[in-house]
Amino acid sequence: MNSLLRHLPQVEAVLQTPAMLTLIDTYSRDEVVTALRLSLASLRADLLAGRVQDLPDFDGDAFAASLEKAMGASRSANLRPVVNATGIIIHTNLGRARLAPEALRAMHDIGVRPSNLELNLATGKRGSRHDHTAALICELTGAESALVVNNCAAAVVLALTGTAAGRKVIASRGELIEIGGSFRLPDVIAQSGATLKEVGSTNKTRLSDYADAIDGDTAVLLKSHTSNFRIVGFTAAPSRTDLARLAAEQGVILMEDLGSGVLIDLSPYGLTDEPIVRDILDAGVDLVMFSGDKLLGGPQAGIIAGRADLIDELRKHPLARAVRIDKLSLAALEATLRLYRAPFDPLARIPVLQMLSQPLVEVQARAENLAQALQDLDGLNVSVARSSAFVGGGALPQQSLASFSVRLDGGAARAADAIADALRHGHTPVVGRIHQGRLWLDMRTVTDPEVSMIVTACRALFAR
Ligand SMILES: *Cc1c(COP(=O)(O)O)cnc(C)c1O
C-alpha cells in the first residue's frame, strides 16, 4: 500500500500537463493548485485507509476534468470567496478579517478530528473550552482573566446581564452608540435587564456627571468606544484613570465596550486613535469587551478581559452557555493569538495587520502589475491612481491609509456600474468601488494571487 503512495502524481508535475495549463488559464493558478492539493490529499487518504487498492495510470485530461467539476461545485456555493478591491481592509459585508494560514490549519485539524475541547488532558476530568485561550489573552493584554464568546455584541450583553441586571448602568450621552445591524447600546442595556442612566451631553460629559448619578442602585459605569464616528470640536470626557478611581471609590464596576480591540501599537502606520487593550486595563477599567475579527485579525469572537472575580461570575452565568464560542472559531482564535508572541511578528503573519502596514511602494507595484496585465484589453482604458484605503470594521473612521488603485474605464460603451456589475457576476466575483465615473480597484486589500483572478475576470469581459 505504501509503495502506491510513492506513485501518487507530484503537484508540480501535474501542473505542467497541457490540460492543467488550460485550467489555470481559465480559472487561476491558486484555485487550481488548491483543488489539486485537495484531490491528491483525498486520494492519499483513500490509499492509506485501504479504500483504494491500486492507482490507474495517470490520465491528465480525465484528472483535469474531475478537478474542474470539483471547482465548479465549490463555485456554485451561495457563500463563496470574492476579491475585495474596495480598499476597506475589514469589510463587514465581505466577511471581515482574512485568517492567517496558521488559523486555517488549526480549524482544519480541530474540524476533522476530535479534540480536547472540554477535556483536561492532565487530569482526565472535564475541562473548560475557555482554558485554551484565557492565559494567552491575559499574557497579551495584562488582564487577570478572560472569557471568549460568540462575538463582541454577545460579550456586551453577557457582561451587562451578568453584572447589572435589575440595577443601574450609567453611560455618557456622547457614547450611546449604534453599531451595524441595529445593535444600539440603550436597547442592549434594556435587554440585559438593567436601567440606563444617561449623563452629560452629546459633546461634553464630566467626571462630576458620573459622580452625581451614582447611587446605591448603581452597578456599572459603561464606557463605549465611539468606533464608527467622531465628535470633534467642543468636547470633553473624563479620562479612564479618573473614571476608574471614581468607580473604585464608589464600589461600582467600570466596563468598556471597545469594539475593535487592537493588541499592538499601530501608530507607526499612522493609526493613532485606536486604544490598545492593555492600556485600557492599565488605566483601571475592570472589564473590556472586544471583537476577534476586527483589528485583532482572527475569527468571529467576542473577548471579555479583566478582573478575575467578575470573569468567574460571567463564566457561570446561564447566558454564557447560549453565547458560547464554537470549537472552530476557538481553534482559529488561539492560533491567531499565538502569532502575537515571539518569535512571530504579528505584522508579518496576520493578514489584517500585514495589509495595513504594507509599504506603499508594494501597493503601487501591485497596481502597476495589474494595469500592465490589462493594457491589451479592447474597450477598456486602464490607469493607476493614488487612493485612500480604510481599516473598516468600525475602527478609525477618520484615518485613511495611503493606497493605489487601478481605475477601469469602459468609455461610452460600458458604464462603470455595468463593469462593476459584470465583475460581481463572474467566476470569482470582484468587488470594487465606483468613483468619478470609473471603477476603482484598490490594491491595498488585494493579494498578489488575487491580481491574477482580477485579470482572468476582466479577460472574460473584454476581448483582447
Ligand atoms: C463592532 C463593535 C461591536 C460588535 O462587535 P461584533 O464582534 O461584531 O459583535 C460592539 N461594540 C463596538 C464599539 C464595535 O465597534
Image: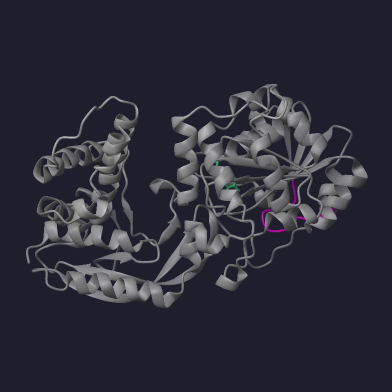
Front residue of 55/326: it is 55
Does residue 301 show up magenta in the picture?
Answer: no
Q: Please state which of residues 27 and 209 is positioned toward the viewer in this rendering.
A: 27
Q: Residue at x 64, y 59 (%)?
A: 342
Q: Is residue 84 above or below residue 255?
A: below
Residue 291 appears anywhere in the view: yes
Q: Is residue 224 above or below residue 437?
A: above
Q: Quadrant of residue 313?
A: top right
Render colour scheme: one colour
Residue at 16% from the left image edge and 62% from the top image edge = 415
Measured along the vertical axis of the image, is residue 443 above or below residue 317? Answer: below
Inspect the magenta stretch and tell me whether residue 201 lies in it: yes
- Regarding residue 219, the answer to whether it shows in the image is no
Q: Quadrant of ligand 1?
A: top right
Q: Position of residue 230 (x, y in %)?
A: 59, 60
Residue at horizontal 53 percent and vertical 65 percent from the top: 398
* 118 or 319: nearer the viewer: 118
Q: Is residue 170 left or right of residue 190?
A: right
Q: Total number of numbered labels?
A: 0
Q: Position of residue 106 (x, y in %)?
A: 50, 41
Provide residue 451's location: percent of width, then percent of height.
28, 63
Residue under the point 55% across and 49% down: 336
Q: Quadrant of residue 187?
A: top right
Magenta stretch: helix, strand or loop mostly: loop
Quadrant in which the N terminus is drawn? top left
Left or right of 31, for residue 380: left
Location of the C terminus by quadrant is: bottom left
Q: Which residues are magenta?
A: 199-207
- Seen in the image, is 8 located left or right of residue 244? left
Left or right side of 404 for 40: left
Give the x, y percent position of residue 96.
45, 49
6, 382: nearer the viewer: 6
